[in-house]
């Protein structure tokens, strides 16, 4: 199937909300990790989301120029071609973008999609994230209003993060403390600034103790039940049931119960990066250790081309990551839910 149209993406999110499941949003940094994500979704018979962070886009732009926009555009164009060979719908998304990188990343990408839409085509990406968690909420929402208006012109969805997620991702870091919990007052101000769909659709990355990176279950105090308080608080004021489409950030290492509670309370998208990075790299490490005298020219020998050919270990890496994506679909209850 082709990359999801705006209509299909909206339908995907609506079905997830109604069915109390979520789509894994898989960070990719290469054509190979893209194929791993697509394969995992296809084998799970789940639609899904593929996303590119600023660091991933810089890497994709090549180490000579490190241009984020060209890196993101190149992979997106590649995805528009190869995704047609996979029997699932895929939305393309850009991950965390702080204020100092908006002009070099999200704004140019929105402009590209606006040009495509003006020419009668679908947007290049289906959604973009504005990470204003390092800003005061007033400034965060001011920028979010501007970006949401531009996103509407491009027929895309905006994701906003209104309060901090702990840990570090692509240079944006926050301490792990009590500020990692969004309040009803925070989402009231968000609804006042961005509306509840009337000014354009947005996804909301609220904080309930989330931490980016690697952690063991129990080491971080996640409170996904908080999302119910946020939904009900705004529902009572505006008369709209479950008004928010929530995003679960920092999902690696979460327990099954935490994930289930988040799904019941309106999470439709859950980001995975750390776990899938490891799933990709682990088979490569195994191959190198098992075949060290083949991948290295030890003691003046010639090595074994079949073992150092990138295709030999690359296939293993793709399989390892695709299996982790398939597991994520099962964890998030999206397995077998693809649109026909």
Image (cartoon, rainbow, N blue to C red):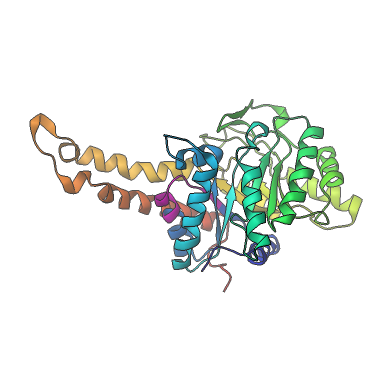
Q: Residue at x 74, y 38 (%)?
A: 162
Which quarter of the picture shows residue 177? top right
Judge by depth and name the residue closer to the eye, 229 or 164: 164
- Whole-percent x and y of residue 129? 65, 45
Question: Is any atom of residue 260 visible in this view?
Answer: no
Q: Is any atom of residue 70 visible in this view?
A: yes
Question: 194 and 59: which one is in front?
Answer: 59
At which x and y percent is residue 55?
52, 37
Numbered range of the magenta stretch: 25-35
For this view, does 165 lie left or right of residue 317?
A: right
Please state, as top left, top right, bottom left or bottom right, where the C terminus lies in the image: bottom right
Residue 289 falls in image quadrant: top left
Q: From the top left corner, tell me how far across and down residue 151 is, in percent.
A: 71, 52
Judged left or right of residue 81, residue 20 is: right
Q: Nearer the viewer, residue 108 or 316?
A: 108
Residue at 55 percent across and 58 percent down: it is 48
- Residue 293 location, quadrant: top left
Does the segment drawn in magenta span residue 45?
A: no
Report how many numbered discs are placed on residues in the image. 0
Q: Is residue 136 above or below residue 265?
A: above
Classify residue 197 as left or right of residue 126.
right
In the rendering, at what x and y percent does residue 235 appear?
Answer: 86, 53
Q: Is residue 173 shown left or right of residue 329?
A: right
Residue 29, magenta (yes or no): yes
Q: Report the front residue among 299 and 325.
A: 299
């Amino acid at each position: 199937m082709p990359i999801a149209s705006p209509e299909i993406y909206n339908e995907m999110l609506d079905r997830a909300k109604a069915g109390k499941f979520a789509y894994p949003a898989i960070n990719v940094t290469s054509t190979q990790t893209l194929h791993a994500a697509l394969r995992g979704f296809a084998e799970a018979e789940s639609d899904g989301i593929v996303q590119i962070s600023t660091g991933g886009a810089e890497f994709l732009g090549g180490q000579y120029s490190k241009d984020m926009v060209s890196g993101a555009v190149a992979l997106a164009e590649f995805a528009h071609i190869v995704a047609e060979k996979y029997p699932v719908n895929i939305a393309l998304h850009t991950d965390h973008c702080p204020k100092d990188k908006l002009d070099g990343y999200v704004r140019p990408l929105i402009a590209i999609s606006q040009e495509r839409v003006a020419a009668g085509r679908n947007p290049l990406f289906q959604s973009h994230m504005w990470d204003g968690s390092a800003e005061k909420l007033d400034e965060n929402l001011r920028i979010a209003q501007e970006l949401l208006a531009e996103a509407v012109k491009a027929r895309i969805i905006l994701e906003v993060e209104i309060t901090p997620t702990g840990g570090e991702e692509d240079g944006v870091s926050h301490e792990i403390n009590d500020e990692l919990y969004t309040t009803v007052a925070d989402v009231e101000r968000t609804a006042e600034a961005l509306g509840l769909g009337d000014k354009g659709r947005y996804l909301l990355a609220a904080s309930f103790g989330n931490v980016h990176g690697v952690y063991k279950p129990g080491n971080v105090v996640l409170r996904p039940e908080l999302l119910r308080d946020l939904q009900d608080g705004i529902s009572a004021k505006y008369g709209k049931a479950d008004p928010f489409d929530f995003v679960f950030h920092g999902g690696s290492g979460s327990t099954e119960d935490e994930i289930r509670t988040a799904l019941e309370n309106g999470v439709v998208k859950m980001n995975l990066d750390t776990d899938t990075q490891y799933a990709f790299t682990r088979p490569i490490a195994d191959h190198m250790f098992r075949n060290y005298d083949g991948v290295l020219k030890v003691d003046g020998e010639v090595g074994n081309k079949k073992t150092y050919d990138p295709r030999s270990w690359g296939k293993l890496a793709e399989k390892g990551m695709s299996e982790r994506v398939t597991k994520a679909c099962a964890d998030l209850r999206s397995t077998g839910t693809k649109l026909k």
